[in-house]
Amino acid sequence: MALALARELGEESGLRRQRRRGRRASPGRPTRGKPGEQIAAWAFLTPGVVLVMLFGVAPVIWSAVMSFQRNNLFSPNTPFVGLANYRQMLHDPIVGQAIEHTIVYTALFVPGTMLVGLFLGVAMNRPLKFISVYRTAAYATIAISTISEALVFIWLFDPSYGIVNYLFSLAHIPQQQFLSSPSEALYVIVIMTIWGWTGFAVVVYLAALQGIPQVLTEAAAIDGAGRWATFRRITLPLLSPASLFLAVWLTINALQLFDEVYFSTSGGPLNSTTVLVYYLYEQAFGGANFNFGYASAIAYFLFIIIIVFTAIQFRIGRRFVHYRS
Amino acid sequence: MASSITASATAAPTAPAALSGRRRLRLPFSPWHLVLIPATIVLIFPFVWLLITSIETPSEALHFPPILIPHRIDFENYPAALNAAPFGRFFLNSAVVAVTTVVANLVFCSLAGYAFARYRFLGRGLLFGVCMTTLMVPFQVTMIPQYLITKWIGVNLLGWAGLNEIGALIVPNAATAFGIFFLRQFFRTLPIEYEEAARVDGAHRLTVLWRIVLPLSGPALSTLAALTFVDSWNSFLWPLIAINKTNEMTLPLGLATFQSAHTTEWTLLMAGNVMSLIPMMIIFFAAQRYFVRSVAATGLSGI
């Protein structure tokens, strides 16, 4: 009721004001602030902005400073050591391995998730019987936490009792060690995370597919284009903004992979799943290290990698992404 | 914003079959079912296997080849898991943290977002810009200072928000740059006339926000609530660092600790896993529309 009243009042006074001033005030640019307005604005802002400053802005600056310090939780003084932490990274063989694992993981996980999402999104974008059952099954993976997901997959891929090895034995494939094997563990993590992100990718592609006007695909069909040609020349280009979004978003998340590695392999066996964030965590909080300075340098390095990857994707994206105006 | 993903899709083009005149095998159902049924089985199999293992006896679970259908349903793993770890407590902690975080975000981000959207004040652009720089920063960069700040707050300021308290999981996330940005963008799309009219009629600024702006912002608020809820509920790295006491753990952290104490007791682990999954599943399916819309909104407004 308050809303209806407000709407009525709004229309009335809007008209009155329009007559008086001859133009409408543009939204977001109210009239110049009076002192009362300034105080009110700050009262509204304070709680939120203080929290963002304290737990967002200040830590960004602080960890930048820390990355130039020898900083340990227990030592009382934190001397500046210049670029020593960054130089240490260059000579640390595990950092090299961690970068390699992170990039291999990202290169498999991102296209894998996008392909699964695109395929299921296209398949589910039609009025079939039981379509809501299919969609719900895909969405369910959005609700599962990374730890629950990893726990199930450790069990599925258990070398001795897991059902995957059982299926392998039915297909006469030799039994595998999976997460206990240095050459396989990272790929098992790729599979479990693709499964975990399927729901997300399907939702994004379904939303984009439903934004495509049917007229376009119908026109192509009338012009004699086959289904594949229609998909390739009409649907896929119109999905490109969603694809770019997914590529960027999934890459950012892939570069920050941690939970599944921590929980299912602890970076092993033989460091074969040590990714950057896991190594950073190990340096900062694993065991009794608390090498905050070194860990901050790794964190900033990760930050730079993320920015570079995102920038590259946008650059490439500009060439391929087709925005409908 | 795709509001009707769950609604039935638009009809697929039916013209080609009639036009091309090509003879094709006629199935009594759409061939897409042949693709979707196996895909769905693969997608839900981990959930099904999780449930089956949780009602098996340990000897059945450690049988090879695996027993796909247990001989009898045995719920004893559930009380056993509850005895081994306080899952009720984990659930309560997760619920308190997630609900408080959502409410705090809605309050603080609407207040700040509204001020950024509608008020003119000294330093508005600068302050907004500074807050927004944190949007791109990965959590790992802020994690160590956040740990030190939380530790300091617990010792010197607020005991309940220090390390090893669930307050430590709420306060750092009580307002986010993303929430402020998201709501500011939405508030700017609302017609300003209603608000001005109420102000002219003498309504207080808070009344305007509460009675006029927020009721018009239902979709944005529910999207932010759903995103914040899932993030908070499933968050792992920060609780792992901040919480070391069993009674203050949330479900993911509690489950991880439980696993490290019972590594090979699969029936027990799966019972614990089911118990940590069920609440989120229920919430998700009860409010599926909002969760799905929140994901779609990230995708569509993101770029």
Image (cartoon, coloured by chain):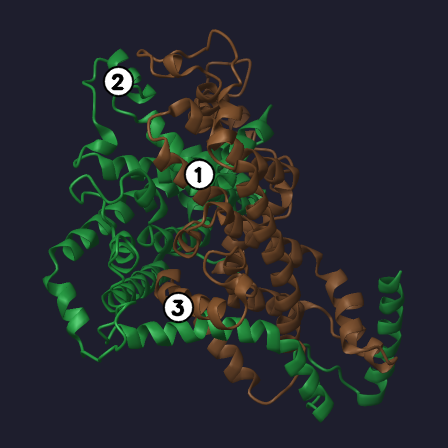
Chain colours: A green, B brown
For label 1, the SS is helix
Q: For the point 27% across and 39% down, which residue is it?
A: A265
Q: Secondary structure at mark 3?
A: helix
Foreground pick, B252 / B258: B258
| Chain letter of the residue beneath label 3 in the structure image | B
User: Can you see residue B39?
Assistant: no
Amino acid bearing label 2: Phe
From the viewer's perspective, is A191 left or right of A91? right
Circle 2 chain: A
Between the residue at mark 1 and the residue at mark 2, the CA separation in whole angstroms equals 29 Å
Packing grade of label 1 (10 A; few <14, some 14-19, many >=20) is many
The residue lying toward the viewer, choosing from B168 and B131, is B168
Give the image location of residue B184, x and y in percent.
Answer: 61, 70
Is A11 situated above or below B215? below
Q: Which residue is mark 1?
A: B255
Work out which residue is located at the far top of the displayed protein and give it: B71
Question: Is A183 located above or below residue B95 in the figure?
Answer: above
Q: Are marks 3 and 2 in contact (CB under 8 Å)?
A: no
Query: Which image quadrant for residue A27?
Result: bottom right
Residue of label 2? A168
Which chain is indicated by disc 1? B
Q: Are marks 3 and 2 on the same chain?
A: no
Answer whether labels 1 and 2 touch (C-beta < 8 Å): no
Q: Is residue B35 above or below residue A118?
A: above
| Circle 1: residue type | Leu
State left or right for residue A220 relative to residue B99.
left
Q: Earlier in the sequence, mark 3 or mark 1?
A: 3
